Image: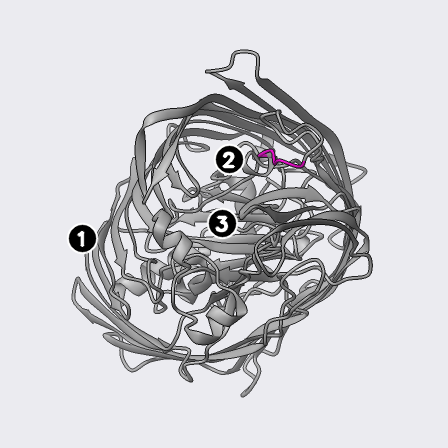
Amino acid sequence: MRIFSIALFGVLVPAGFGHTFTYAQDSTAVLTDTTITYSIDEVVVTGTRTYKRIIDIPFSIQRVGQSQFRFDRKVSTYDVLGSVPGLFMESRYGNHDTRLSIRGFGSRSNSGIRGVRILLDGIPESEPDGQTRIEAIDFQSIGSIEIVKGNSSSLYTNAPGGVINFINDNTFPSSHLISFNQFGSFGLRQNGFKTGIRTHEYGFLTTYSYHQARGYRAHSEDYWHILNSVLEASPGDDSKLSVHGYFVDGLIRLPGSLTAEQFRIDPYQANQRDVDRDSKRISRKGRVGIRYQSFFGEANNHEVEVTTYGTFKYFERTSNVYRIINRTGLGASGRYVYHYPMFGRRHEFSVGGDVFYQGGPIEFYQNIGGMKSDILTGLTDETISNAGAYFQMTFNLLPEQMDLLLTGRYDKVVFDVRNQILAAQNSYRRFEDFTPKAALNYKLTPTIALYTSYGLSFDSPAGNELDNFPTSSDPNSLLNPDLEPQESKNFELGIKGNVIAFNAPVFERVGFEVTYFHSLIENEIVPFEVFGDVFFRNSARTRKQGVEVGVEATIIPGLTANVAYTYSNFTYDEYRAGVVQFDSVGNIVTSNQDFSGNIAPSTPMHYGSVSLSYNHDFSEQVGAFLKGTYRYATGMYVDDANSAKTEGYGLTGLTGGTDLTFGSFNILLSGGVQNIADKVYVAFVNTNSAREEFYEAGEPVNYFGSINLGYTF
């Protein structure tokens, strides 16, 4: 089945870069089963910003290939990354607006993603301040996803929780054209095409998707146009030039969060205040990036890579005011890698840096039922930039057995906001730090490794987190003068690998990973509300520790079991803060409260998933797939005071499909049902709501189907 072969080829090519250089080939072992999530022989680039096998990297990394979600619904990150240990996602309204956290980092965000660096083809999708919205990620176009779990601040800006790199499917071997058509409950419709052209000189991928959905809650419809393209050429045998571009245009309406009583009466209703405001996000943005990569020297032991990119962004945001945001940005990154022998062992040194500058005006208007007034009430010019440089050294202490990794990064993040109406009102804030990390990897066998690391992290506030509030120490400032970056000390210890019993009748291969992590966070940034609007403050000290377990086993040929489990114990060691609340008759009440010893909200103590999938080829022309999934999570506290806790939930889903080939033509049919028991549950917690509007419901029972038509040239 030729289209299926294309998908598998994409899994096999290292790091999704589509060109295999000599050194990368020397580091790649034979892959025998590309469906194993924890395949230790797979080569990735995100974790260390160099080509390395997962077994050789001294921290937790997972790679999800296209073949693992090709039959699934592809609407949000929850659909394709729901079984990654340590990664917790709270889906809002079933669309792109998903809160994503790794080991608790990122759970503070009530909108977008924080604390986790998001990349698309290795280029930052995150803003210069670390805030991320992933409208540009088209899961029909993605070929693989690399997830680095845990502190990555020594290599990336604002990445205390880790890094996720979405890699477009640009490693196909043959030219092809695919039309995809997805439909489902609540008005879900997604149509588009994907085409790839492959010659000896270049490869070109382009994907267009149109997505629309009515939504399962009132006032939650969304639509998107998404265009992604990648063009690659090889100027020489050991060099590559690539151009990456996308354009996104869409809208999400926001139903808002509910009180416990509103949730009990109708969990799928919208908050009337958000309906009256017509709360929504209109987004239009694009990016073009150019990358040059070359290997040179004896045995190609030198590598140079340079990437430049430009962005434009236009946003409309409605809440109590109507904001129009225009931004343009320029960014660049580069790295140099040198593999060198010393005392009969092979070591590695690399150095690199990143810079991203973004600025533009923000207009403020009155919000009149979701329409902006004709009168401009405010105008600011906002500039955000980050610049950072890192080094990395890998020392081979014992040949083919033990490696020591030392990394360090200096970052500077700058905010400059100027009031264009009141010239005297300007605000400037600068955050900078150096974050080192040391890690050790020891192979018990060629396929099993112990690893440990210790490092510091630094996470500056995002632009929206610096919005000033009426009770700050300087309420006239444009930027919150009291908010400081959060810093943490992070330790992890783990074991990962594969146990292989060739030709065994059962359990021929078992891939596994177990990791213990511990983070001590100073000045953690947490959300709170004042007069119905969300602002941010620092808690004093937070302790996060837990265990991640992932197992994937081939029970018999074609039958695979996947188990993911995470235990999270996140507590406030020291935390005293002023609280602004409304009393029973709507009066504003302020008080000081001590939250020390409380559990951090928005993350369950236990969560995980279990799935069983069967893939069978009846012939070269006909294949079939069936998967059953159970996902669960215990209850979450809704605020720092631990005043209430959501109920735990368990969700069951079933997905199936068939892959048919007729010469050069291919038809892939799939469908499924999610939340089979129609469980009513809280999928998202609006943390620290002063109005006690904490609750947002998850998706009820829903169905989807897809028809993909393909032709290989």
**Crowdedness near tag 1: few (<14), some (14–19) or many (≥20) residues, C-alpha within 10 Å:** few
Q: Nearer the viewer, residue 232 or 262?
A: 262
Q: Which residues are magenta?
A: 467-471
Q: Residue at x 45, y 69 (%)?
A: 698
Left or right of residue 480: residue 559: left
User: Tag 1, which secondary structure?
Assistant: loop
Q: Of the residues tagged 2 and 3, which is closer to the observer?
A: 2
Q: Nearer the viewer, residue 213 or 690?
A: 690
Image location (x, y in percent) of residue 167: 44, 48
Question: Would you place residue 522 above or below residue 176 in this image?
Answer: above
Q: Tell me the amino acid under the disc marked 3.
A: Pro
Q: Nearer the viewer, mark 2 or mark 1?
A: 2
Q: Which residue is mark 2?
A: 127
Of the image marks 2 and 1, the number of the one nearer the N terminus: 2
How many numbered tags mark residues here? Answer: 3
**Residue placed at 78% from the left, 56% from the top?**
595
User: Where, by quadrant of the figure, is residue 6 drawn?
Assistant: bottom left
Q: Is residue 2 above or below residue 308?
A: below
Residue 46 in the image: state x and y as whole percent: 57, 45
Tell me which numbered mark, 2 or 3, is placed earlier along the sequence: 3
- Circles 2, 1 touching at the beta carbon (< 8 Å): no
Identify the element where label 2 is drawn.
Answer: loop
Mark 2 nearby-residue class (10 Å; few <14, some 14–19, many ≥20)? many
Quarter of the rendering containing residue 375: top left
The amino acid type found where label 1 is placed reads Phe
Q: Is residue 8 visible?
A: yes
* Between discs 1 and 3, the one toward the N terminus: 3
Residue picked out by circle 3:
14
Q: Position of residue 588 (x, y in %)?
A: 62, 49
Q: Which mark is residue 226?
A: none
Residue assigned mark 1: 713
Would residue 246 be found to the left or right of residue 557 on screen?
left
